Each structure stands twice: as C-alpha cells, then as structure tokens.
Amino acid sequence: MEEALKKAEDVVLEAIRRGNFEEAGRIVFRDVFKPLLDLIFHIEKEVDRNTENIARLTEKVDKNTENIAKLTEKVDKNTENIDKLTENVKKLLGETGRLRGRDVEFRTGLTLQGWFRKNAPDYEVFIWDGTEADILIEGRGILASIDIAIKPKIEDVRQLKNGIGVIEENWGRKPDLLIIYSRSGIIPKRVADFADRMGIKIVRKPAEIRKILDESK
C-alpha cells in the first residue's frame, strides 16, 4: 500500500510540474480517495451487517431469556408440586404406620383375650374402642386399663394416665390398675422410670398381667 501511494505521489507531482492539474486531480481521486471511499463503503456494509446480526442475536437472547423465565416458572411449579406430594406421602406413611399400629394392638388384644380365657377365666378381657386404652380386664373386683405398645413411649404413659377419667365416665368405674403391655418386650429405661413415677406397670408377658391382677385382690 505504501509503495502504491509513493508511485501515485510521483505521478501527481509530475503532472503538477507539467501544469496538468486536471490529470493530477483525477490521479489523486482514482488512486487515493477512491480506495479510501471503497474501504469506507465496505466498512459501512460490514457495520450494517454486524448491526443486523447483533439485532438478531439480541432477539434470540430475549427469546431465550423469556424461555428461561418460563422454564424457571415451570421448575418452581414442579418444585411446589413435589413439596405437596412429599407432604402427602409423609401423611400417608404416618397414617399407614398408625393403622399398622392399631392392627397390631387389635390382634394383640385378641391374643390376650384368648390367653385369659384359657389360663385365667376369672378375668374377662374387653377390647376398648378408644384412645385412652386398648383393652380392659375385669374380674374378682378388679378393673385394669391396659395400653398395648410395640415399644412403650413416654406418650403411652401419659395417655394411659390421662384416660382414667374417660374410662370411669364410660365404664362406670375408675380403673384400679394401669398397665402397659410391651408387644416387642423392649422397655426403655427412661420410659420405665417415668411409668413407675406415674404408678403404671409395664409388662412383657400375659402371665405378668395376671400376676399383677392376682396380687391386687
């Protein structure tokens, strides 16, 4: 480029020395200004093209932003639905566990009922339809309120103790004995200590219940 300009300069100077200014002007325009104008025109076209591309890209970015916003909204909605589903599953599992526990309590109550009929017929076992106890055992002037638990908890002790008034109101007399029957045979020490302070016995076998009843006459 520098060499071409030098040649053009020499030609222009020669034309000027000859007094041919018109030719010198044409040379300047042809060899200097025209390439510059062509370059400027080319640059403008590139700028326009790039501007158009940037506009398209901006449009795509805006569209992607909109899609991302919609996707985020869907994710939030799905997260909310998952949270609700998780909560419902927890409730269902809790209810299933409660029903399983009630089933165990009922079947254990029937087992105790059969055991007492065979081994201690002087006592009658009644399945109690309430939350205060699971069975009542009556005989020889004694009434025992019994809660059946797979593994006794502090709440079982409190429930049995707090249910005395309800049983008295519905059965017609106050329980003489409060007993928790551990279906698993496991009795946590802290529960045993708390039950002892509340005057409640915790047993593992039907024979232990009969022994407590016999000793209370």
Image (cartoon, rainbow, N blue to C red):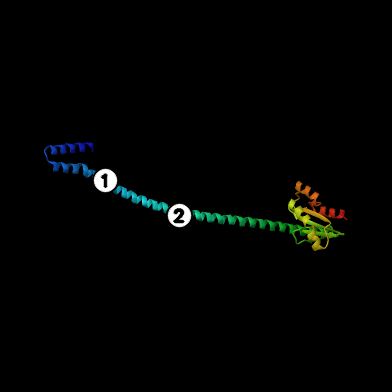
* 11 or 146, nearer to the observer: 11
Q: From where the camera sits, is residue 113 visible?
A: no
Relative to 37, say whether 93 is above or below.
below
Left or right: residue 10 compared with residue 153: left
Q: Point out the image quarter for the N terminus.
A: top left
Who's the residue at 76% across and 53% down the image?
Answer: 158
Left or right: residue 197 compared with residue 74: right
Decide: marks 2, 1 in contact (CB < 8 A)? Answer: no
Q: Position of residue 177 (x, y in %)?
A: 83, 55
Q: Position of residue 63 (x, y in %)?
A: 42, 54
Who's the residue at 23% across and 36% down the image?
Answer: 2
* 50 or 144, nearer to the observer: 50
Give the SS element for disc 1: helix
Q: Point out the image quarter for the C terminus.
A: bottom right
Give the SS element for disc 2: helix
Q: Position of residue 91 (x, y in %)?
A: 64, 57
First in sequence, mark 2 or 1: give its number: 1
Mark 2 highlights which residue? 67
Q: Specify the label residue 40 is tagged with.
A: 1
| Residue located farthest toward the left when viewing the structure as drawn | 18
Relative to 20, say whether 85 is above or below.
below
Q: Position of residue 198 (x, y in %)?
A: 80, 51
Closer to us: mark 2 or mark 1?
1
